[in-house]
Amino acid sequence: MNDYWRARGKSKEDAVKGSAKRFLGIDLGASSGRIFLGTLENGRLSISKIYGFPNQGVQIFNGLYWDTPRLFEEVKKGLRVAVENHGSSFNGIGVDTWGVSFALLDNQNDLVGLPRHYRDRRADGMLEKLVKKVPADELFRRTGIQPLQINTSTQLFTMVETRSPQLQVTEKLLMMPDYFNFLLTGVTCSEYTVATTSQLYDPFRRDWASDLVKRLGLNVGWFQKIIEPGAALGRIHETVEEQTGLDLETPVIAIASHDTAAAVAAVPVEEDIGGWAYISSGTWSLMGVELERPLISEEALRYGLSNEGGVFGTVRLLKNIIGLWLVQKALEQWKLERDAEITYDDIERQAEQAEPFAHFIVPDSSVFLNPENMVDAIQKYCRASEQEVPRDIGSVSRSIFEGLAFRYRQTLEQLQDVSEKPIESIYVVGGGSKNSLLYQFTSNATGLPVNAGPSEATVAGNILMQAAAAGEIDSLKALRETVKKSFNIKSFRPMMSSEWEEAYKRYLRHYEQQRTG
């Protein structure tokens, strides 16, 4: 028993008591971090939040950064809370985070500067330079990933082009969840699902695209060995034991560490691969289908679809759509302007009462990526596109929800065009699945049944992949059967189909005007 816990009168259990398996899931999102206890017993999973803390980019002069030292300190606080309330022995720990962001380490394994936020503006205009060096279609054929400004490849290329001195002392590159796994264990490696988000991974060789890495002026030696989701990294580092009280033998599992991969693992679907689409709904909406192999074609490139890694050998063909980020940023502004407590329930209620189809927006337009004032950005967008300007909470928020529903319909049609099986249903997982109005709108717009939940799909996928590593789950089907037995799922059916069909045609005309104008 170390001094930290001796002073508090605590002792370590020799083993987890009883037949239930207990896991800690660390879920780091772009706006918050949470730590959950997951208990698997008799084929059912229960999860409870132990600790939470905010996360946001830190602005320093013109740069936007992730405050990784503070985030790790918060993780350790959460682990201490877990030990204080639930004992020191657990069957595993797993970390998931957002994709594309990365940490650079020197030859002492120290950070080479704070990692940049994917919304950082240093890469503005760099994608155009990147695709001159490696054409967009070649980037897609080599990696299965669409060229985007937020991609790891674009961010690193920016550092090369601007001759960042950080690259001169870099020895290792770790994607964000890999960095937190390193802080917990001292082990450096790269987990498959998050590596695939980098646009530097070859999905056919199932390794880093070393030739592409070199062409972008990067060092192949920076990139770590890729391991499969569900691999055990080893026990926690002794310093983590000393600072948290966790049993030193607690294993850390490289779960599906990209949060979207973890969420899609927990889709409570009954069908096999194909026949359904998913939306991982949160700050971003990730909409796609699950495949057995990458789909790299001219149509997929034209539609803006990407191939990212999934669990148990699957591939997720998807599109990134700016999601409830628009509502989050609008809510911030309304609170400032009105000096009042406004909730998401208030927004949903007022949106439902607002006039339908009065304003059309394309949610993933670049003007909505990171504006200072989201309400003002939406109003300027409507004014510039010669529409009536939405003025109140209800009309602004309804324009967002309808815009998302129409964008989902548009993406669904693109996915259907490249899919082998007809898409007959949609499954929504993640925090945004609690927004009943949005997903009734989605059912109306697409004409398909929509099944929403679990809202904590990322955590469920995180913990159940740990359970798979522990030998408690042997297949993706078994994992999803556990989810179905463990969580309530809400279903929506299409309503007012003719009105939505006519409005969708108007949206498409608006979309074309924005695209060509």
Image: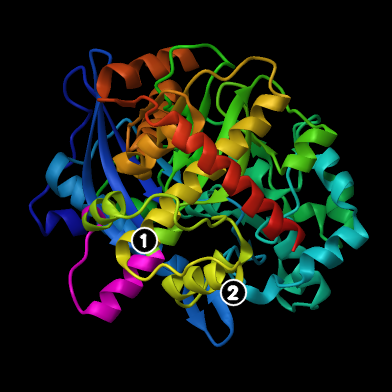
Please check the rendered image and state whether residue 343 is part of the magenta-colored stretch, yes or no: yes
- Crowding around mark 2 (Cα neighbors within 10 Å: few <14, some 14 to 19, many 20+) is few
Q: Is residue 364 left or right of residue 49?
A: right
Report the Cα–Cα distance between label 1 and label 2.
43 Å
User: Which mark identifies residue 395?
Assistant: 1
x 18%, y 69%: residue: 341
Q: Amino acid at mark 1?
A: Ser
x 41%, y 13%: residue: 478
Q: Is residue 349 above or below residue 165?
A: above
Q: Is residue 309 left or right of residue 93?
A: right
- Asked whether 233 or 35 is in front, the reply is 35
Q: Amino acid at mark 2?
A: Gly
- Magenta span: 329-345
Q: Is residue 216 visible?
A: yes
- Asked whether 294 or 229 is in front, the reply is 294
Figure quadrant of residue 368? bottom right
| Image spot of residue 392 (x, y percent) | 32, 68
User: Which mark identifies residue 113?
Assistant: 2
Figure quadrant of residue 412? top right
Please check the rendered image and state whether residue 138 is part of the magenta-colored stretch, yes or no: no
Split into 4 quadrants, where in the image is the C terminus?
Answer: bottom right
Q: Is residue 298 left or right of residue 154?
A: right
